[in-house]
Amino acid sequence: MEQTHALGRRKAAVARVYISAGAGNVTINDRPLEDYFKEDALRYIVNQPFAVTETEGKFDTKVTIVGGG
């Protein structure tokens, strides 16, 4: 299975994102999206790129965030 990844840095914060073919699961710091973001508006923002590209439910996303206060 092919996996695509990206790295973002800002001051002391580092975010790593891994996307692979899957069932549409989103995991942030080893927690499901629903546990990490309790507000519907924040979950909507996370899923918006998949909705715009009509790829909802086709990719699993794993995000690791460290630092940043």
Image (tube, grey):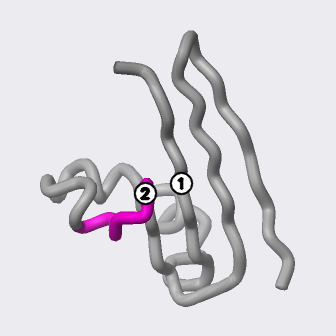
Q: In this view, does 21 lie above or below 6?
A: below
Q: Residue 63 carries which label?
A: 1
Q: Identify the residue shown where x is 58% and y is 38%.
A: 15
Q: Do the residues labelled 1 and 2 touch (CB within 8 Å)?
A: yes
Viewer-side residue, 52 vs 27 = 27
Q: Identify the residue shown where x is 44% and y is 66%.
A: 27
The amino acid at mark 1 is: Val
The magenta-colored residue range is 28-34
The amino acid at mark 2 is: Ile
Residue 2: horizontal and vertical position, in percent? 85, 77
Q: Identify the residue shown where x is 76% and y is 54%.
A: 5
Determine if the magenta segment contains residue 14: no
Circle 2 residue: 28
Q: Is residue 65 above or below residue 29?
A: above
Tell me if 64 is positioned left or right of 18 in this view.
left
Q: Could you tell me how far apart the alpha carbons at marks 1 and 2 are, in whole angstroms? A: 5 Å
Sequence-first tag of 1 and 2 = 2
Q: Is mark 2 on a helix, strand or loop?
A: strand
Q: Residues within 10 Å of mark 2 (few under 14, many from 20)?
A: some
Residue at the right extreme? 2
Quarter occupied by residue 20: bottom right
Q: What element carries label 1?
A: strand
Residue at the left extreme? 39
Q: Identify the residue shown where x is 53% and y is 49%.
A: 64
Q: Is residue 23 above or below residue 69?
A: below
Residue 41: horizontal and vertical position, in percent? 20, 51
